[in-house]
Amino acid sequence: MSTQAIRNYEEAGILPAAARSPAGYRVYTSRHARALHAFLALAPGHGHQTATAIMQAINEGRTAYALRLVDESHAQVLEDRRTLEAVEAALRDLSPVAEPRGDSFVGPLARRLGIRPATLRKWERAGLVRPGRDRQTGYRVYTAADVRDAQLVHQLRRGGYRLEQIAPLIDQVRTAGGVAPLESTLRDWHARLTHRGRAMLTGAAALSAYLDTDDAVPSGRADRS
């Protein structure tokens, strides 16, 4: 890592402010080393932005807020796991859709999914849902198959997938009418969540070590800048 990167981390508040030697050099201690280790360990699990916010809060003495940020990341992972389980459950239940009864319009379907009607229209432009039109009013009409597609799109979007990633999956589901085309995607999703969970454990250990640092013990290292 370059000396400039260390200075940048200090300026960003990721590292605590360094003292200066009589000659004006920055003096780094074991506390700075542990702060750097904590940040680098936190970033893979929490993301760069959240890891930065956590370290800034710790260095400003707002430990409770920093721990809340950690909690929020863990809550998001839990929500992602629940979303994945919901997607898997939905796919397990997929079967060829019979001629629908009680078609839905854009407003009621949007409310059912907790999204805006404009989002459904965006998905339609991307080819993810294909509603028909009412012959008399021209309004969009969503059949049971369209509702299923919209639910899957919604769940996959919550799982972090982009529209261009979802489009071929929806096409495969329409064609195959089952879960087989998505098995590799779901395995990858599981692997990513497992990797993030493990990374969070590593980050938690490094952050705990940093919080236990004795600020009074200097390392004697000076940055010549």
Image: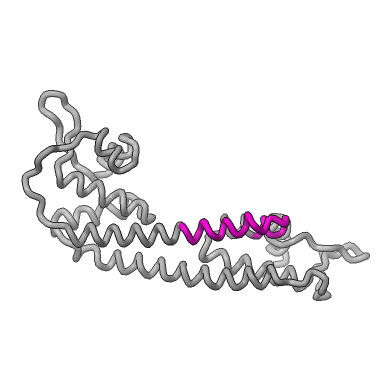
- Residue positioned 20% across, 34% down in the render: 105
- Residue positioned 19% across, 53% down in the render: 171
Q: Is residue 129 left or right of residue 202?
A: left
Q: Residue furthest front?
A: 64
Percent from the top left, x then y, of residue 161?
35, 55
Q: Is residue 159 above or below residue 29?
A: above
Q: Nearer the viewer, residue 98 or 124?
A: 98
Q: Is residue 133 above or below residue 160?
A: above
Percent from the top left, x then y, of residue 177?
14, 58
Magenta segment:
55-75
Q: Nearer the viewer, residue 209 or 118?
A: 209
Tell whether position 164 is magenta: no
Q: Nearer the viewer, residue 113 or 34?
A: 113
Q: Is residue 178 above or below residue 158?
A: below
Tell whether position 73 is magenta: yes
Give the position of the N terminus as an image quadrant: bottom right
Name the chief secondary structure element in magenta.
helix
Residue 115, quarter of the rendered image? top left
